[in-house]
Image (cartoon, rainbow, N blue to C red):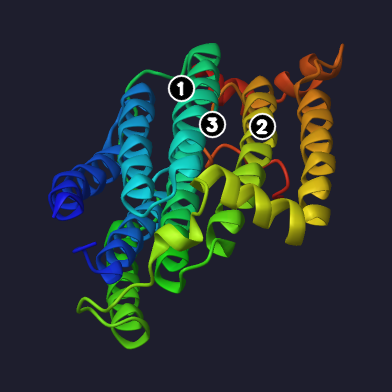
Amino acid sequence: MADWVAFWVIAPIAVVSAGAMVVSRNAVHAALLLIVNFFTLAVFFLILGSEFLFVVQIIVYAGAIMVLFLFVIMLLGVDREVGLGEQLKGQRVLASLLGVGLLAEVVAAVRLGVGLRRSALPDFRAVNQGGNVQALARVLFNHFFLPFEITSVLLIVAAIGAMLHGRRHVGDEETIDALPEAEEVAAK
Amino acid sequence: MRTPISYFLLVSGTLFTIGTIGVLLRRNALIIFMSIELQLNAVNLALVAFSRQNGNLTGQVLTFFSMVVAAAEVVVGLAIIVSLYRKRRSVDVDDARMLKW
């Protein structure tokens, strides 16, 4: 019963915050709405019996990743309002049509695959024996140990890649900023 | 649990659709990137829901890996956006046409 109430409280917040994020004109507002959305997803994880991912979602997504986003927004000073006008003709109509089609497809797939009605669920307490974190660690370090180690390589490569991209090239910038196009963009 | 698993999948699909529309509609590179994050999170929710449905933890492990990849993706993506801004003084994706001639 509690999960029913929690779901119907949280689900509208998740959908509304996501929708408002997509249409917000201000990048900072979009980031804050996305944080709200990440918190609602964390609650969904908790309802689904995944305490570890609940905590990781809040720490990694709502904490680290969104702080990084806000930092970049502030760093670039792009928090001014931007228009929602369309560059391509009919872009908005086509995108909305595609969205409606995708949603219909998802509903059809869920209906065919899982069924919209409630079905008997396996007992998750047996799966989560000794706590969700312990159970997840058992699976992770027994069956997925090699992928787990490879993710550490991925993180190192990502850090090095970010460093290379963020590095300021001396003399590089002037030549590219001197292009007439770039000045026109800057004047806008 | 009284809530059917399909409800979580429907919420996940709705969030994914909203993210897709955001990617298609917006021209601010940062907001496009946030929409991609929204899509990744929607898929994570579907994976955790499937984990609950099947009664094993593989879906949660996959979500964990997807979060690691998303973190790496955010780091590199934001670095690209910062270096793009340095060159063009704009994060509008319509201004990023250096490879076009």
Instruction: Indicate left or right for A88 with A131 as reference.
Output: left
Quadrant assignment, res B8: bottom left
Where residue B18 sits in the image (x, y, percent)? 33, 54
Q: Which amino acid type is marked by label 2?
A: Val
Q: Which residue is mark 1?
A: A188
In the image, residue A23 above or below residue A33: below
Cα distance between the residues tagged 1 and 2 = 29 Å
Q: Which amino acid type is marked by label 3?
A: Val
Q: Residue at 83%, 49% (x, y): give it.
A: A150
The quadrant in which the N terminus of chain A is found is: bottom left
Sequence-first disc among 3 and 1: 3
Q: Chain of mark 2?
A: B
Instruction: Indicate left or right for A76 with A81 as reference.
Output: right
Foreground: disc 2 or disc 3 = 3
SS at mark 3 in the image: helix
Q: Residue at 41%, 62% (x, y): give it.
A: A124
B3 or A57: nearer the viewer: B3
Q: Which residue is mark 2?
A: B75
How dense is the environment of label 3, judged by Cα within 10 Å: few (below 14), some, or many (20 and up)? Answer: some
A157 or A49: nearer the viewer: A49
A25 or B62: nearer the viewer: B62
SS at mark 2 in the image: helix
In the image, residue B85 above or below residue A118: above
Q: Which residue is mark 3?
A: A60
Q: Which amino acid type is marked by label 1?
A: Lys
Cα distance between the residues tagged 2 and 3 = 12 Å
